[in-house]
Image: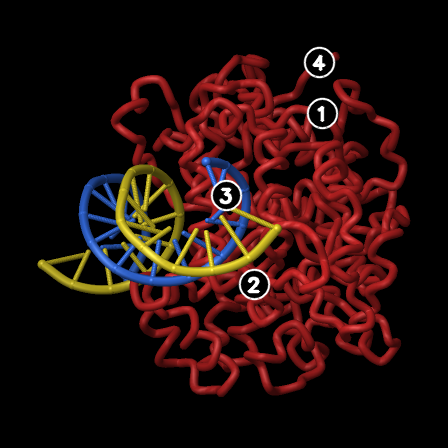
Chain colours: A red, B blue, C yellow
Amino acid sequence: MPVLTSPDIANKFKERWLAAYPEDHVTGSESVPLDDSLTSLHWLQNFSILSADPERPSGTGPGCPSSQQHFFIKRLGFPGPGTDSPSSPPAGDTAATGMPLYLGSPVTSGSDSTAAIPIQPSPPVEVDYKTNPKVKPPYSYASLICMAMQASKQPKVTLSTIYNWITENFCYYRHAEPSWQNSIRHNLSLNKCFKKVPRQKDEPGKGGFWQIDPQYADMFVNGIFKRRRMSASHYSNSNSSSGTHRQSKLVQGYHTAQNGCTYQGMGGKRKHLPLKNSNKVMRATESPLLATEANKADILRGDFDLSSVFDDVLSGNCSTFEDLDINTALSSLGCEMELSGQGRQGRWCGGADIMGQSQHMNLHHQSYNYMDLSAASMECTISMGELHVPHTDPQQQQQLDPDHLLQSHHHHHHHHQLQHFDEPSMLFPEQPEEAILQPWEEIKEEAQAIPLTLDQGFGLCEGFFTEMQPWERVESYL
DNA sequence: TCATGTTTATAAGAGT
DNA sequence: ACTCTTATAAACATGA
């Protein structure tokens, strides 16, 4: 099958989008000046778009994903379903910032990535992280942990589960010296985003369980850690207790509180290769050329830190509106907050596991809507309706290029459909005790965590996109 | 003994 | 220059 490169996809999508929505024609050069926090959500949102496709063949077994799925899995570099191979991430992880979207073996030429989007300065290449032991996945350890937690489908996971998932999905770590496990443990211990759940006394087994600390749920956006570096003005401008509160956490230094959920999920742009093997290990993060590409891709994917936006809004720092299509952001949140009144709760990490793979988690009827999730840091309860900035306001409505519209537009038109978050997040399972799976109920986690399907692994993160309409599907524009 | 978990130290890339 | 963030290494403790 033909494999489309990123520019190909973008261009085709753009063309078809504009054909369908000529009113959305804006100058492509006016990309949104997203700050760094807005450049790191991508892969999972993309992932969500794809995996949210209700018609996507679900039985894509190992090695036989649907074409689209395959493309995106490859494209996103995320360990996909089952044995599908992880491959180049789309600058999702911080560590991926500035990295080539593809690395490794060339796939397609991208020669017809034409005018509209002059990206992809170098031939796209692709890395199959699942089978390529040479390339270190550009995900931070925190992100890896996070992925493993998501993939496990359990509210809490053991260390070995995390190990197993990582080794299963990233060949690099299968062959790497085990020091990376030390780093994983180090991350779990130091990063306050991760919370240890002690094993019950009468429960056999070793070690405790780990989960995302709900207190930091708002730092966990769409399945990845977000840790944007706040500007000084942001700090000073934030006088609401909410904003201040959370920022006070955020600004905790790594050395004073390395734990302060300082991980961005998107990993740092770190090469930092051990001398002993730096010559053989190539981390796919080092193409300055493609940093721009990555940013563009971010925009293309409409990735931004919604929680940060939301936070900004609530803290009265509306400067963000100048940088973001707030409607997009808010819509993306599924944000008519009335949803809480339905007893259905939203969450930052979306998670409508629409395909009903929630057998295990149906026990968890914890109530996390957006407010709940961020209750620790945001004390006001404001209807999102009040926050809507009329997107007829030319000053505030950001000029989106068609690529950006890829995502934002469907939010504009369909955010009302994104209000349903049927599935409680398993990542922040601070539900009433009786609702929590007892540790011993952790079902064969080692065996189960590995061979995940796309949906199983990441349905959790589909929150914003779980109810995509057919027209919303990317492939319909390709 | 080994797996797990905590803590300290250090290095380095990148942002401010 | 300084700070933040992440990676890496290592010492040490604990418990099965």
**Residue A473 picture location, percent across and down:** 79, 40
As drawn, the label of residue A83 is: 1
Report, in whole angstroms, how far the alpha carbon at label 2 lies from the one at label 3: 21 Å
Looking at the image, tell me whether mark 1 or mark 4 is earlier in sequence order.
Answer: 4
Report, in whole angstroms, how far the alpha carbon at label 4 lies from the one at label 3: 27 Å
Q: Can the viewer see residue A402 in this picture?
A: no
Question: What's under tag 1, amino acid-wise?
Answer: Thr
Looking at the image, tell me whether mark 2 or mark 1 is earlier in sequence order.
Answer: 1
Question: What's under tag 3, amino acid-wise?
Answer: Asp
Q: Residue at x 42, y 59 (%)?
A: A190
Q: Residue at x 49, y 62 (%)?
A: A323
Say if A387 sits above or below A391 in the image.
below
Query: According to the image, label 2 marks what residue?
Result: A195
Query: According to the image, label 4 marks what residue?
Result: A2
Discs 1 and 4 carry the same chain letter: yes
Picture mark count: 4
Report, in whole angstroms, how far the alpha carbon at label 2 lies from the one at label 4: 44 Å
Say if A474 sits above or below A145 in the image.
above
Report the chain holding disc 2.
A
Label 1 Cα neighbours within 10 Å, binned few <14 / some 14-19 / many ≥20: many
Label 2 Cα neighbours within 10 Å, binned few <14 / some 14-19 / many ≥20: many
Q: Observer-nearest residue: A235 or A373?
A: A373
Report, in whole angstroms, how far the alpha carbon at label 2 lies from the one at label 1: 29 Å
Q: Residue at x 76, y 38 (%)?
A: A448
Question: What's under tag 2, amino acid-wise?
Answer: Lys
Mark 3 lies on a secondary structure that is: loop
Mark 4 lies on a secondary structure that is: loop
Looking at the image, tell me whether mark 1 or mark 3 is earlier in sequence order.
Answer: 1
Does the residue at mark 2 contact the one at mark 3 (Cβ under 8 Å)?
no
Report, in whole angstroms, how far the alpha carbon at label 1 lies from the one at label 3: 21 Å
